[in-house]
Amino acid sequence: MSEKRDETILFLPGEIGERALRARLVAGEDAAYRDCYQQYAPKLMRLLTGILRNKARAEEVLQETFIAAFRGIARFRGEVGIATWLARIATNRAYNAIRDDSCVKRTAPPPEPEPVSRFEPQVEGRDLARKVMVILDRMDPAKKLALLLQAQGYTVAEIAEISAEPRGTILARLSRSRAELSLRMAEAGLATQAIPASMEDRS
């Protein structure tokens, strides 16, 4: 009997820590909401700032992400990690926000781009970080998102889950995106060494 019970636990999806956190969230434990936010919010905030290029808007979408996640936690079965699940919600809401903002603010001047903190330690100063982000802004949104996710440490498999696309598609996109970013940086007279090391291949 005990062997059967242990075997059932072994095949539950997700890591032990994530299973425990998910169970606490489903149970409506206030401390679990706080723990989840503290653990995952900083990384999501960097990602959202990179997508939206506006800190205030990123903070709004971050709050919306966690509200949506906590309300829908009962439907989350742990097929992917919590970080991947949250990133999928966050990116969907970020691009919805971009579409909404473009409808309302077609005539408004674009906001001053904000550098993403993840890049700053990897490049020679904030000015170079800003220039790299401006180049990313000019790239196809899917390519930009793939590079931003990889820069935040997501694996290719996780990016595929977040983007809801095959792993092979993401691998090809990352390869093309890194090549395009290097070319655009060279054309702008920027050193390609400024590309964060975290954009190297990760499976």
Image (tube, rainbow, N blue to C red):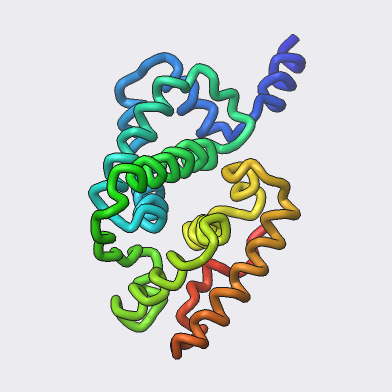
Number of numbered discs on residues: 0
Residue closest to the far front: 107
Q: Is residue 15 left or right of residue 25?
A: right
Instruction: Look at the image and tell me whether residue 28 can be seen.
Output: yes
In the depicted structure, whether residue 145 falls above or below residue 66? below
Q: Is residue 58 left or right of residue 15?
A: left
The one nearer the camera, 135 or 109, is: 109
Image location (x, y in percent) of residue 86 = 47, 37
Residue at coordinates 42% horizontally, 14% vertically from top-left? 27
Q: Is residue 26 left or right of residue 162?
A: left
Residue at coordinates 36% horizontally, 40% vertically from top-left? 100
The one nearer the camera, 9 or 99, is: 99
The one nearer the camera, 184 or 102, is: 102
In the depicted structure, whether residue 174 falls above or below residue 120? above
Residue at coordinates 59% horizontally, 28% vertically from top-left? 78
Q: Is residue 180 left or right of residue 59?
A: right
In the depicted structure, whether residue 175 falls above or below residue 50? below
Residue closest to the far bottom: 189
Which quadrant, please, contains the N terminus?
A: top right
Image location (x, y in percent) of residue 91 = 47, 44
Image location (x, y in percent) of residue 88 = 51, 40
Res 119 → quadrant: bottom left
Which quadrant, please, contains the C terminus?
A: bottom right
Residue at coordinates 41% horizontally, 44% vertically from top-left? 99
Res 80 → quadrant: top right
Instruction: Look at the image and tell me whether residue 153 can be seen.
Output: no
In the depicted structure, whether residue 64 falls above or below residue 193? above
